Amino acid sequence: MDCIFCKIVAGELPSFKVYEDDETLAFLDIRPVNTGHTLVVSKKHSTNIFDVSQEDWTAVTKVVRALAAVIEKAVSADGININMNNREHAGQVVDHLHVHIIPRFKGDGFKLWHQSAYKEGEAAMVQEKIKAQLV
Ligand code: 5GP
Ligand code: ZN
């Protein structure tokens, strides 16, 4: 399969690895938002949140939680964003499951996203749509 993160996992492409275990690999993002920006990937290929196994997802999130504290300390950050892009229109460029750990610094100016407001009655409608999918 022609997947750059599978190639990084296999050691066929170089990366600055910061952590590795049987299920996961964490390495520095090649184009960091801020210094220390790290990607945590599952070693087994899946595309994103929609097809990852519960087992692989659990392994990835465990590492994300541990590394967030480690990275914050290592680069003396003032906070951390955890981000994941799923599918093209949500900003996913590399189709191999990965979670971003992004160190934040006071005044770095990185804007997360814009926010809006629900119209009258809209929130209740959306709530029902979501709940209907759960059954
Ligand atoms: P996405 O937009 O898919 O969530 O993020 C993909 C990330 O992978 C981007 O932040 C990009 O800089 C990073 N990236 C793409 N190719 C490589 C690579 O070959 N090596 C590393 N270390 N990071 C990469
Ligand atoms: Zn892959």
Image (tube, rainbow, N blue to C red):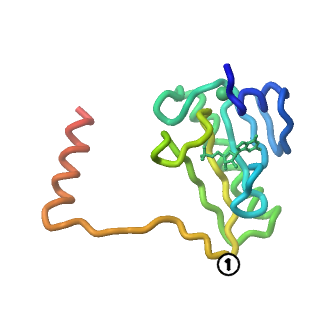
**On screen, 120 above or below 32?**
below
Q: Which of the 4 image quadrants contains residue 71?
A: bottom right
Q: Position of residue 43 (x, y in %)?
A: 70, 28
* Left or right: 91 as drawn, with respect to 103: left
State left or right for residue 8 relative to residue 123. right
In this rendering, the answer to whether 116 lies above or below 3 is: below
Q: Quadrant of residue 40?
A: top right
Going by the numbered disc 1, the residue's amino acid type is Lys
Camera-side residue of 82 and 12: 12
| Residue drawn at (84%, 27%) of the image | 12
Looking at this rendering, what residue extends furthest in the left direction? 121
Q: Residue at image x 52%, y 48%?
A: 91
Question: Measured from the top left, where is residue 115 in percent x and y?
Answer: 38, 68
Q: Which residue is mark 1?
A: 106
Apparent side of residue 82 relative to residue 18 in the rendered image (left or right): left
Furthest residue toward bottom: 107
Secondary structure beneath dot 1 equals loop
**Callout 1: few (<14), some (14-19), or many (20+) C-alpha neighbours within 10 Å?**
few
> Given the current orientation, which residue lies at the most extreme top position?
1
Number of marks: 1
Left-right relation of 127 to 48: left
Image coordinates of residue 18 in percent, x first then y, are 83, 45
Q: Quadrant of the N terminus?
A: top right
For the C terminus, give its image quadrant: top left
Q: Residue at x 64, y 34 (%)?
A: 59
Determine if the C-beta at disc 1 is less than 8 A from ligand 1: no
When asked about the image quadrant of residue 10, the answer is top right
Residue at x 17% of width, y 56% of height = 124
The correct choice, above or below, for 2 with respect to 21 in the image is above
